[in-house]
Image: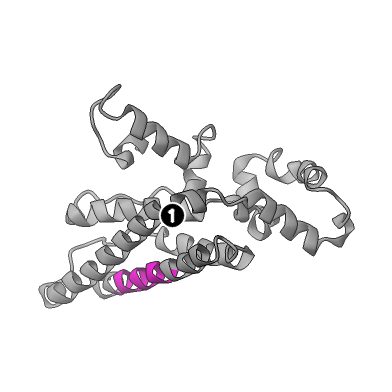
Amino acid sequence: MALEKQHLLIVFSGMLDDVIAQWTKEVNTNGKEFNFDSQDCFRSIYEEITKEKLVEEYPPEDFLEARKEHIAFLLESATDVIEFYQKHKELFSGYDREKLMIDTYRKRNLVYKDYSDNDLKIELYKYTELLPKDIYYESPFYRDYGFLLLDYHFQIYMWCRQTITTIKNNFKDERQYQTVLQTESYAPYFTLTQIEELHKFIDGRQFLEMSVMEFLG
C-alpha cells in the first residue's frame, strides 16, 4: 500500500504538469484551444486525482526519503496550478461551456443541425434540468455531453488548494476530497466559484477567519 501511494504522488504530479501544459496552450491562443478534447482530458484527470485519499498510512522507514521527494514534487506542481489559475482566472471563468456542449451535441446529432442555440438548449432541458441529480450524473447524456458544463479549471484548482493544505498538515486528519458531483446533490444553489467569491467577501467580517476549504466544509 505504501509503494502504491507513493506512486500516486508522482502520477498526480505529472497530471498537474499536463494541466499546466494545456492551460498554457489556451492562454497563448486566447482560449481557442479550449474544446471538447481538452475538457475530456480535464475530466479524466479530475476523476483520477479525486478518486481516493493520497495517503492512508505512514510508509515504512525504508521509503521515507523517497516519500519526501515525491511529496515535494506534488507540492510544487499543485502550487504551479494555483498560481497559473489565479493569473488567468478571468479567461478560464469566461469560457462558454454551455455553447461547447450545445455545439457538440448538434454536430453529433444531425437531426438538430438547423436548431438555434436557444432552441436546442430548451430541447436538452429534458436531460440537463428535469432529471434528478443522481440520475443525471449517471446518464449517458452526462457521460457524453453534460460533463462539458463543468468548470474543471476551477475544480482542479480547488483540489490543489486542499492538497497543499493536507501536505502542510503532514496528512493529519486527511479526508476524502468531495467532488463537485458529490456536493451538487446537496448544495445545488451556488457553484463553487460563487462560494469562493462569497468567502472572500465575508471572511473575517461576518464570521471568524477561516480557509475557503473550512468554509466549504
Left-right relation of 200 to 40: left
Q: SS for tag 1? A: loop
Examine the residues drawn in magenta and state their main secondary structure: helix
For the C terminus, the image quarter is top left
Q: Residue 94 placed where, x, y %?
A: 55, 48
Q: Examine the structure image and report whether residue 106 is included in the region drawn in magenta.
A: no
Left-right relation of 78 to 94: left
Q: What residue span does the magenta drawing correspond to?
A: 7-18
Image height check: is 16 above or below 123? below
Q: Residue 4 placed where, x, y %?
A: 30, 73
Q: Residue 95 placed where, x, y %?
A: 58, 52
Q: Residue 127 placed where, x, y %?
A: 72, 46
Q: Examine the structure image and report whether residue 11 is included in the region drawn in magenta.
A: yes
Residue beneath the point at 72% across and 60% down: 104
Circle 1: residue type: His
Q: How many marks?
A: 1
- Its colouring scheme is one colour
Residue beneath the point at 45% across and 67% down: 24
Left-right relation of 62 to 209: left
Q: Which residue is mark 1?
A: 88
Residue beneath the point at 63% across and 64% down: 36
For the N terminus, the image quarter is bottom left
